[in-house]
Image (spheres, helix red, strand yellow):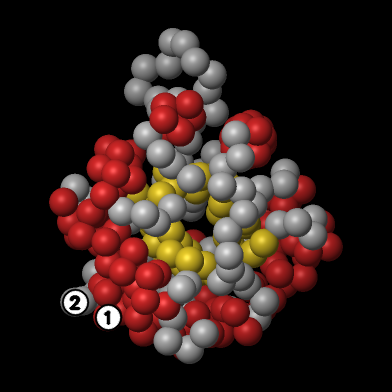
Amino acid sequence: MSKIKTPIVILNFKTYLESSGSKALNLAKALESVSDETGISMIAAVQTVDINRIVEETNIPILAQSIDAISPGGHTGSNLIENFIENGISGTLINHSENRLTLADIDVIVKSTNEKNLLSVVCTNNVSTSMAAAVLNPSFVAVEPPELIGSGISVSQAEPEVVEGTVLNVSNANKDVKVLCGAGISTGDDMKAALDLGAEGVLLASGIILAENPKTALLDLVSKI
Ligand SMILES: O=C[C@H](O)COP(=O)(O)O
């Protein structure tokens, strides 16, 4: 699945208790339900151990939260991309702020996802790193100022110049790469602001995962598209 209809919402389940194990499945079903009701693409980036069950029990695209830059063989504690594929992933996050990689490893993983027709979402922290990531030819660059992650302060409203600058410079660097933004996004106004700035979707976590009713929060998120 190298193409997907935008705008998109990618919910990163991270390692919150509220988005782990059986609760991860419930959250993925809420995403599936909102996607079915609204027609907006909803994607879940789930913990490795939850992938297989969620793939089996929902029909939304599932991403790994990270993939190791390894080939088959002796690598204890790592996860092989071929095994993720057998378990049904549609793609992966790469270089999230909470799991940074070297540039060389990002390159290896993006090449591998492109060869295998998977979605690749390379996370970046500012305009410059977004341009550098775009040259590697991922499906998406997701710009997220780390200081706003989990803050409840939306990048699209508090630092619009980061989103706008990323959209412009990524387009100049590689017109095939789409831009997402993330950090502090939770409301319909936050998502609308992101799209108005030229982003093709959002990458978010705490605003939905920790909401009293995640499905209601998801419906609000897409209410102004
Ligand atoms: O992957 C998601 C981002 O790190 C944003 O997290 P957040 O929505 O909790 O700020």
Crowding at dot 2, Cα within 10 Å, few <14 / some 14-19 / many 20+, comes out as few
Near-viewer residue (155 or 82)? 82
Is residue 49 among what the camera can see?
A: yes
Relative vertical location of residue 62 with respect to residue 204 in this rendering, above or below: above
* Numbered disc 2: secondary structure: loop
Near-viewer residue (35 or 129)? 35
Near-viewer residue (110 or 222)? 222
Tell me what residue is drawn at x 72 percent, y 52 percent.
134
Q: CA distance from mark 2 to mark 1?
A: 9 Å
Relative vertical location of residue 5 with respect to residue 95 in this rendering, above or below: below
Residue 142 position in % (x across, y down): 57, 60
- Which residue matches tag 1? 216
In the image as oriented, which residue stretches furthest toward the top? 74
| Left or right: where 144 falls relative to 84 | right
In the figure, residue 140 lies in which quadrant? bottom right
Tell me what residue is drawn at x 48 percent, y 83 percent.
190
Is residue 182 among what the camera can see?
A: no
Whether tag 2 and tag 1 are in contact, CB under 8 A, the answer is: yes
| Kind of residue at badge 1 | Thr
Near-viewer residue (92 or 29)? 29
Tell me what residue is drawn at x 23 percent, y 54 percent.
25
Residue 157 position in % (x across, y down): 53, 84
- Which residue matches tag 2? 212
In the figure, residue 43 lies in which quadrant? bottom left
In the image as oriented, which residue stretches furthest toward the left? 22
* Numbered disc 1: secondary structure: helix
| Left or right: where 146 falls relative to 194 | left
Residue 203 position in % (x across, y down): 48, 64
